[in-house]
Image (spheres, helix red, strand yellow):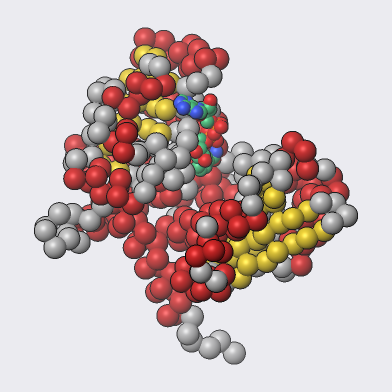
Amino acid sequence: MLLQQSSLFESMNKQGFEEIVFFSDPKTGLKSIVAIHDTTLGPALGGTRIWNYRSEAEALSDVMRLARAMTMKAAGAGLNLGGGKAVIIGDPERIKSENLLRSYGRFIETLGGRFITGEDVGTSLEDVRVIASETKYVTGVKYDPSPFTAYGVFHGIKACLDYLYGDRSMEGIHVAIQGLGKVGFELAKLLLDEGAKLTVTDIDGRKVKACIDIGGECIEYVESKRIYSVECDVFSPCALGGVINDSTVKRLKCRIVAGAANNQLENERHGEILSEMGIVYAPDFIINAGGLITVANEYMHGDVDIRMLKKEIEKIGDRLGRIFRMAESMPDSSGNPMSAARAAEIFAFERIEKISEMKNIYIP
Ligand code: NAD
């Protein structure tokens, strides 16, 4: 656990954290940690997660991990935003109340806009609206990000097909989708519209039925355990994190892994294994940034021009192409290409480094 291994300041310095704030309000039971990782590109943006952590140290580790990931995601998406995240400790079913959320909103207001927040695990749109009654530093209240995340994943898949087959067409392409929730279902519709055939799975049978109702013969269902070994062009994880791990990676019979789920690789090594297996991997924080691009636009402009927004999200495909080429051009000492996951991290942090150099100039 983070606090036991090294001092908090050592950890912050090592991982490049700017600020960690602890909010406590015994009257409402609020215990919250806000981690602001890097604001070189702009204010830190990240959702507020309410979770029943086993310890405060676990909550701190989680908020730091998630905040750093947001820095990479915003930088990789070309946004002028930094990375941050907030957690509220406790079981959302038990601790959530209007006064706790409003108390939290007042604390967020004290950060003066260095941190902007929104929905996450354990918080709903309704909760964000309550938080927004006390602070202007919230977003994701007007537009549901999920269809835009799906739109970005769709364009990311096209970029992967182009890289591998030299053709972006979906006609006859076989995609296996794991998870038909808010993103997976929208993605299925986009793919079907362009002639793809699908194999789908979800632990919720109603979602599978609804998908088969719209796709008919173009859709086949498999039990959730069998989705990894489906012979297909694209495996699209749209349910959970950590799905590419020691037990699943050897079963994959796809040419591409490209989906919406966060933290798809159990660890960095699995990105390397995919690369060694010749499977094209679309790094998750690049391909699933459509929702973040949407809430960032909502924050900056209030009302969003959907046509312009979609154009911005389509650029996810171009970014993936650049990352794949970057990975090829940086082989390791044995001549193997760098994994796309590693190349994506370098791509994101390079932008931050370049902007931080440029900001050395004093503007009177
Ligand atoms: P969701 O909760 O609406 O959908 C997840 C679906 O996965 C559910 O239908 C659930 O029944 C299914 N599922 C859970 N475990 C499964 C299993 N073992 N096998 C098959 N299906 C399973 O979530 P969502 O908003 O669609 O997001 C999907 C993923 O994408 C999540 O990992 C999320 O963190 C990530 N993501 C979402 C967004 C967004 O805009 N919603 C943005 C970025 C990343």
Residue 207 lies, in percent from the top left, at 53, 18
Residue 162 lies, in percent from the top left, at 24, 40
In the rendered structure, the answer to whether residue 147 lies left or right of residue 120 reads left
Q: Quadrant of residue 59?
A: bottom right
Nearest the eye: 346 or 195: 346
Residue 227 lies, in percent from the top left, at 35, 24
Q: Is residue 16 above or below residue 175?
A: below
Q: Is residue 303 above or below residue 92?
A: below
In the rendered structure, the answer to whether residue 336 lies left or right of residue 6 reads left
Residue farthest toward the left in the current orientation of the protein? 334
Residue farthest toward the right in the current orientation of the protein? 27
Quarter that holds the C terminus: bottom right
Instruction: Count the numbered circles shown.
Output: 0
The residue located at (50%, 60%) in the rendering is 68
The residue located at (44%, 74%) in the rendering is 355
Q: Is residue 209 above or below residue 258?
A: above
Does residue 302 appear in this view? no
The residue located at (84%, 45%) in the rendering is 98
In the rendered structure, the answer to whether residue 28 lies left or right of residue 3 reads right
Residue 126 lies, in percent from the top left, at 75, 39
Does residue 117 appear in this view? yes
The residue located at (43%, 49%) in the rendering is 285
